[in-house]
Image: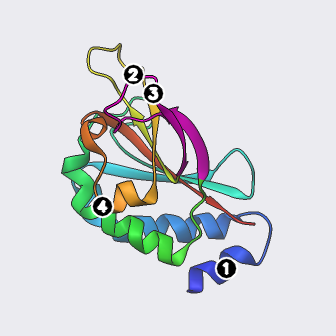
């Protein structure tokens, strides 16, 4: 795991780490990049965190796409990324979209992927974040929330 060694040597991501990660992402998502998608790798809210953003169009005004159009390439990318890098997780308290009980059901979930979900009929770019667990991504359990995706984000920590 040559990538883990490089990232774990310090407490912050260096420019060469970001360049290496950008190359890694572009290599594994080359087909989707050829189809008009793009990848942005940048520091997150802290220097010891990196954010990988996958989108179509421009990052600030992305073109909505369907998870079904990218999942066959994105899932293997995610699996390889999780083998080579340490993906950050976050605890998310949100409604349980899979519950048949009531809309008031909520749970705390440990998530690793964030979709900027664009509800149909909203203004140009009003989004809501929707978080997914590793299991939901790898086993394609995104459901209806995958129809109007603007940006898919993954965070890496360098602890």
Residue at image point 20% right, 49% down: 68
| Comes first in the chain, label 4 or label 1 | 1
Mark 3–mark 1 Cα distance, whole angstroms, equals: 34 Å
Residue farthest along the bottom direction in this orientation: 1
Tag of residue 125: 2
Instruction: Return the mark for residue 6.
Output: 1
Question: Observer-nearest residue: 55 or 23?
Answer: 55
Disc 3 target residue: 128
The reply to whether the C-beta atoms of the residues labelled 3 and 4 are less than 8 Å apart is: no
Q: What residue range appears in magenta?
A: 90-110
The percent position of residue 77, horizontal first and vertical second, equals 36, 67
Q: What residue do we see at 52% from left, 54% from top?
A: 112
Q: Residues within 10 Å of mark 1 (few under 14, many from 20)?
A: some
Above or below, 16 relative to 107: below
Q: Residue 89 vs residue 159: left or right?
A: left
Q: Dot 4 corresponds to which residue?
A: 139
């Amino acid at each position: 795991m040559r990538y883990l060694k490089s990232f774990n040597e310090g407490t912050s991501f260096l420019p060469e780490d970001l360049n290496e990660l950008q190359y890694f992402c572009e290599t594994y998502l080359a087909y989707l990049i050829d189809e008009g998608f793009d990848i942005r790798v940048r520091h997150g809210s802290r220097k010891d965190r990196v954010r990988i953003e996958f989108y179509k169009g421009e990052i600030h005004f992305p073109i909505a796409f369907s998870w079904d159009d990218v999942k066959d390439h994105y899932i293997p990318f995610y699996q390889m990324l999780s083998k080579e890098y340490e993906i950050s997780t976050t605890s998310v308290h949100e409604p349980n979209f899979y519950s048949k009980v009531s809309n008031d059901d909520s749970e705390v979930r440990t998530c690793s992927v964030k979709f900027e979900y664009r509800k149909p009929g909203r203004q140009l770019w009003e989004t809501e974040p929707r978080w997914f667990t590793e299991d939901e991504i790898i086993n394609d359990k995104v459901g209806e929330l995958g129809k109007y995706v603007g940006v898919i984000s993954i965070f890496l920590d360098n602890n």
